[in-house]
Image: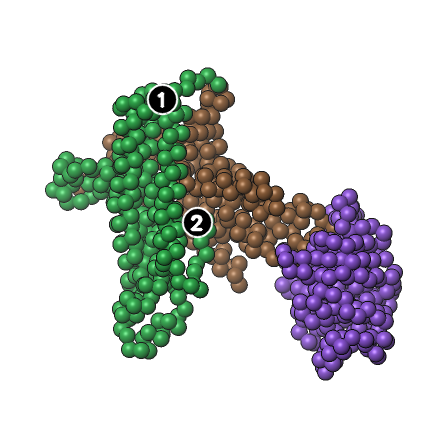
Amino acid sequence: MIKFNNVNKWYGSFQVLKDCTSSVKKGEVVVICGPSGSGKSTLIKCVNGLEPFQEGEISVDGVSVGAKETNLPKLRSQIGMVFQNFELFPHKTAMENICLAQIKVLGRTEDEANTRAQELLDRVGLGEYGNKYPSQLSGGQQQRVAIARGLAMDPIAMLFDEPTSALDPEMINEVLDVMQQLAKSGMTMMVVTHEMGFARRVADRVIFMDEGEIVEDATTDDFFGKPHSDRAQEFLSKILEH
Amino acid sequence: MLGDFDFGVIVTALPYLWEGMQLSLLLTGLAAIGSIALGTILALMRLSSIRLFQWIGAVWVNFFRSLPLLLVIFWFYFLVPLIVQGQVDAFESALIGFVLFEAAYYCEIMRSGIQSISRGQAWSGYALGLNYPQTMRYVVLPQAFRNMLPILLTQTIILFQDTSLVFVVGLADFMTSAVTVAQRDSRLVELYVFAALVYFVMCYFASLYVKTLQKKMHR
Amino acid sequence: MNYNWNWGILFEEPYFDWLVSGVEWTLFVSAVAWIIAFSLGSVIGVARTVDSVPVRAVATAYVELFRNIPLIVQMFLWFYVVPEMVPDDLGRWMKRDMPFPEATSAIFCLGTYTASRVAEQVRAGIESIPVGQRAAGLAMGLTTIQVYRYLLVPVGYRIIVPPLTSEFLTIFKNSSLALTIGVAELLYQARQIENYTFQGFEAFTSVTLIYLVLTMIVVALMVRVEEKTKIPGYGIQKDK
């Protein structure tokens, strides 16, 4: 479903991504982890073209992300993305947040959009909160609305960029639960995260990145059982102390 | 000296002065709408990645901010009839001059406003499949306007004061009307003091309103 | 477009002299008004930051008064109304014997108006200094006046050099309003030339260019001043 080959990216003279190659099959859940500055956020933002890349190829469901002819808005409407800082639109209610792209991009009518939005709010446990503004919601609630907003476009895959890093500890689980259910329902997911517990329980594969390179790319069992590289081992030992 | 103050002159002149004020307000309103719109476009141009647009925006802003408004008013009063090859009302010339001039100031306000909206907001718009015009229209610009509203209003109060300059091209706004009555009835002191008072009261209370608006927005 | 071009006319007498004289008056009026604006504005700006409530109130009243009345109305008040409001003897002198009555009124008008703007900049500069500085000064045993003199004013001023540049440019542009009371500054001369020769395009273009060039010179000078007075790590963002 998502394939990337030899992706290289530079910011000026600084190389952020070095020869990144991997893939995510339909229905797979892949977790990307690694120390700060390893390029994992950058990589995931390249998948839906929010960040450009200078070399290599990325394709989603056969459509090349880097090609000039590709209709990026159309491609992006098929991939959902959830951000670390939620990025809900503060001047719109939860319902309006979820409906905006449905109406403007997919061309659904207001009624269709509202129905779908209500379904998704129910699904993430926020059925009563449709009329609230983001400033009236907690961080965990906002992130769940953000997930619903992404799902409203009926995407073929969902990207998560450190979805729980900006949350207070009590709220991390409510978001991870929603993500776990999503995974169980068969959604193709790429998740950048530090939550190794989640990775162990939910992910099919784990990719470990360091300094722009993919250092490990293994099934969850392999990764946690017998990691190959020193760097991965070091990273795990530091993280798993929690 | 103060005993000669003749309030009667002001009272009889009130209807005429009110007509002048209506023109001042009309000019202010139309100019504000036009220059905020143009200013927003200029701001988007200055922030775009297309070099040519950036350049046009920067030149426009720096050009008009280097010139006195009076000069711009004279230019358009002189130039517009010449280009149109016919009779043009002073109001239209003045309006065009004001819109082009004040747009340079509104541009900087909107540019600051747009830049204050975090990149993540635009990104989440794009991530949903919205294109650039849609993201600007539904996500970024509404927020930028809301945030900049107090400053936009303050600039509009300044614009209102600036409209008094149309006196020099004989346009019958409040200021011109006051001067006309003053000269006609030889009552300069009463009329000019009255004009100052009227402007003061209007601008002072308008800026008080903006201050309360600002406080409400920062709760 | 029906128009007879004649750029040469700008260099003929007396028009060329008119332009030169216009530039001289513009610069003179702006410079003297700036001296008033800077000194008066500093006093009022500092006055807005002191603890004494009555002093602050007077300063605030000054600022509110001058910023809510259009500049052209203020010009008219200074030229036509002030001579009537002062004691009769002074009024008569102002109307008859005072040299350059138009320019004097314009200078006082521009000076007092811009002083209110300078006051706001000075206030912003002083208020941007962390409260702790004032406390530290007092704790060392300095009197309030000494705190202002050695700590707040020197630092405050260096912070506001960029916005003060804008204020000087503003006085310079606003000097054009002096034509409404008959001061023969640059824009006045442009209209004179247009009235006499009907070569409006040339007249206004040349004056536009002169304003642009003078602005650029002032900005270049001020950038140099900014460089010399910058305090590393401090600053108020200037909107350019």
Mark 2 element type: helix
Q: Residue at image x 20%, y 43%?
A: C85
Chain hosting mark 2: B
**Residue position marked by numbered label 2 in the rendering:** B206
Q: What amino acid type is highlighted by mark number 1?
A: Gly
Q: Which chain is purple?
A: A
Q: Residue furthest bottom?
A: A241
Residue A233 percent across, percent down from the top left: 76, 78
Can residue C99 be spotted in the picture?
A: yes
What color was chain B assigned in the picture?
brown
Which one is in front, A101 or B69? B69
Q: What amino acid type is highlighted by mark number 2?
A: Ala
Chain hosting mark 1: C
Labels 2 and 1 share a subunit: no
- A44 in relation to A173, above or below: above
Which one is in front, A199 or A170? A199
Residue B163 percent across, percent down from the top left: 41, 37
Apparent side of residue C231 relative to residue C31 in the rendered image (left or right): right
Mark 1 element type: helix
What color was chain C assigned in the picture?
green
**Residue position marked by numbered label 1 in the rendering:** C8
